[in-house]
Image (cartoon, helix red, strand yellow):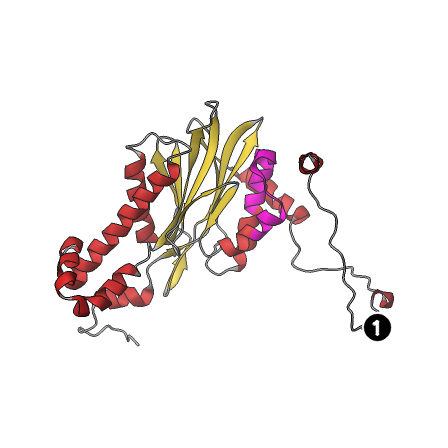
């Protein structure tokens, strides 16, 4: 255990390892429509946490240029480094539906390479290429270092969002996620969520059967607001909220106080209640236990009429 004041023989990176850096959550991005035109709604909290405390002062929204934005979660310093690496690649490419994932992957891979360089320089006093050469002649000694290098994580998750042109040349929403845990880069169809609060925020969106092509802007804003608010049961997700809307031409609009008040009213009406009252239970609702249990069959599908017709066809 490290005691304070810190003794001289305790290295600064040991303290950083103890603290774990400044961690950020939660970020959500979702596609939707407004008057048949695509939009992307984003929702973030402002809380960042360390072992020693937290604050509501970290903006997790960043413009990448050329109509693209990024949402960041995870370790703050690593999130900015990862986003910066992705941004540099985005600025050199014409982004399409077919190359978005590849472009973001290149940026993430660049960040991963930088982490390896940092490790080798700080721990071994040599760059990564020199380390690879050294391992060929010192395989036994180098093995534990190689294990540590291959186990390095990106340290952050990022959602990259913007618009690409479809086959007809019309703007189409695109959301790409870089995962901190798996380092995997994926294209999200309807919405994406990152950060510790994502495990709480995603289920309400699934429960709402979120489909971007059938979700109007106002409803999308409320759905994300609801999901984020429910995620506040986690200590790492703070109450401060920002909701923004990205348009195909790169314009950004932010939800105003009246909009937040309206979402709060909707949450009181449609959101889950912390307490249940007025339950009138009857004894007849229970019966004798049987070895062959009574099984309630699932309710009919709640698919919309249009989807039912598609399924039948």
Nearer to me, 47 or 36: 36
Nearer to me, 248 or 291: 291
Instruction: From the image, give the main secondary structure of the stretch colored magenta.
Output: helix
**166 displayed left or right of 154:** right
Q: Provide residue 261's location: percent of width, then percent of height.
A: 58, 42
Look at the numbered disc 1 and give the secondary structure of its residue. loop
**89 displayed left or right of 138:** right
**56 displayed left or right of 32:** left
Above or below for 238 versus 106: below
Asked if residue 64 is among those painted magenta in the image, a careful observer would answer no
Q: Quadrant of the N terminus?
A: bottom left
Question: Where does label 1 land, which residue?
Answer: 288
Q: Give the magenta-colored segment's residue range.
A: 203-225
Asked if residue 214 is among those painted magenta in the image, a careful observer would answer yes
Nearer to me, 22 or 295: 295
The residue that appears at 58% across and 39% down in the rendered structure is: 211
Q: Quadrant of the C terminus?
A: top right
Q: Provide residue 133's location: percent of width, then percent of height.
A: 13, 57
Residue extending furthest toward the top: 168
């Amino acid at each position: 255990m490290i005691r304070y004041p810190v003794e001289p023989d305790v290295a600064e990176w040991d303290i950083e390892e103890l603290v774990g850096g400044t961690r950020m959550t939660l970020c959500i991005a979702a596609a939707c429509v407004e008057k048949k035109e695509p939009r992307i709604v984003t929702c973030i909290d402002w809380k960042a946490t360390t072992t020693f405390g937290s604050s509501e002062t970290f903006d997790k929204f960043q413009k990448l240029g050329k109509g693209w934005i990024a949402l960041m979660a995870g370790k703050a310093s690593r999130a900015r480094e990862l986003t910066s690496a992705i941004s540099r690649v985005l600025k050199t490419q014409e982004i399409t539906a077919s190359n978005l994932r590849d472009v973001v992957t290149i940026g993430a891979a660049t960040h991963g390479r930088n982490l390896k360089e940092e490790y080798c320089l700080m721990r071994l006093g040599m760059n990564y290429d020199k380390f690879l050469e050294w391992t060929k002649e010192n395989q036994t000694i180098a093995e534990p270092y190689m294990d540590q290098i291959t186990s390095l994580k990106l340290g952050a998750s990022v959602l990259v969002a913007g618009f690409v042109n479809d086959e007809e040349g019309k703007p189409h929403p695109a959301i790409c996620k870089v995962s901190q845990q798996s380092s995997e880069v994926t294209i999200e169809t309807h919405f994406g969520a990152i950060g510790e609060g994502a495990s709480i925020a995603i289920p309400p969106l699934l429960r709402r059967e979120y489909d971007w092509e059938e979700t109007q802007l106002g409803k999308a804003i409320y759905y994300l607001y609801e999901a984020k608010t429910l995620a506040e049961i986690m200590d790492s997700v703070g109450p401060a909220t920002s909701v923004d809307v990205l348009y195909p031409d790169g314009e950004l609009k932010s939800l105003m106080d009246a909009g937040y008040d309206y979402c709060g009213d909707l949450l009181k009406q449609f959101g889950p209640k912390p307490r249940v009252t007025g339950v009138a239970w009857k004894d007849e609702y229970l019966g004798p236990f049987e070895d062959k249990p009574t099984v309630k069959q699932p309710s009919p599908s709640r698919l919309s009429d249009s989807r039912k017709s598609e399924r039948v066809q």
